[in-house]
Amino acid sequence: MSNNDVMKKLRVALSLRDDDIIEILKLANFRTTKTELSAIFRADDHPNFQPCKDQLLRNFLNGLVIYKRGPMPKKEKKEEPNA
């Protein structure tokens, strides 16, 4: 299964629009445009088809975690006892 297939299936399963996907990618500090997104959702034989690179999928999945769970809480610094 290609990265394009994974993105297509997640898009349908989560009922996401292009704007939603762009916002999710922004949560992972990754910028893309609607044009770039539409190219990865096209059929393999379409002249404007682009393969979805690992970086895009990775950042989408990281952003999706933040989108669904919220940002990771900051860890408190533990003070070591003075010796």
Image (tube, helix red, strand yellow):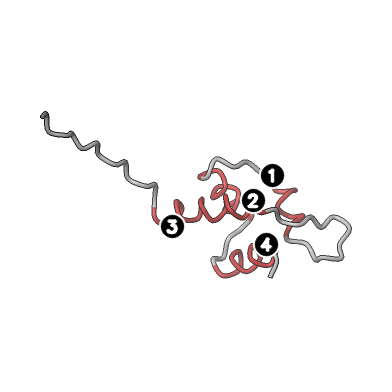
Which structural element holds mark 3?
A: helix
Query: To which residue does mark 4 refer?
Result: 3
Distance, label 4 to label 2, CA atoms, is 9 Å
- Mark 4 or mark 3: name the one nearer the start of the chain: 4
Q: Mark 4 or 3, which is nearer the eye?
A: 4
Q: Mark 3 or 2, which is nearer the eye?
A: 2
Query: To which residue does mark 2 refer?
Result: 56
The 10 Å Cα crowd at callout 4, few under 14, some 14 to 19, many 20 or more, is: some
Q: Position of residue 29 (x, y in %)?
A: 55, 40
Whether residue 48 sits left or right of residue 63 in the image: it is: right
Q: Quadrant of residue 41?
A: bottom right
Of the 4 image quadrants, the one containing the C terminus is top left
Q: Position of residue 24 (x, y in %)?
A: 54, 50
Distance, label 3 to label 1, CA atoms, is 22 Å
Mark 3 residue type: Lys
Q: Marks 4 and 2: CB-CB under 8 Å? A: yes
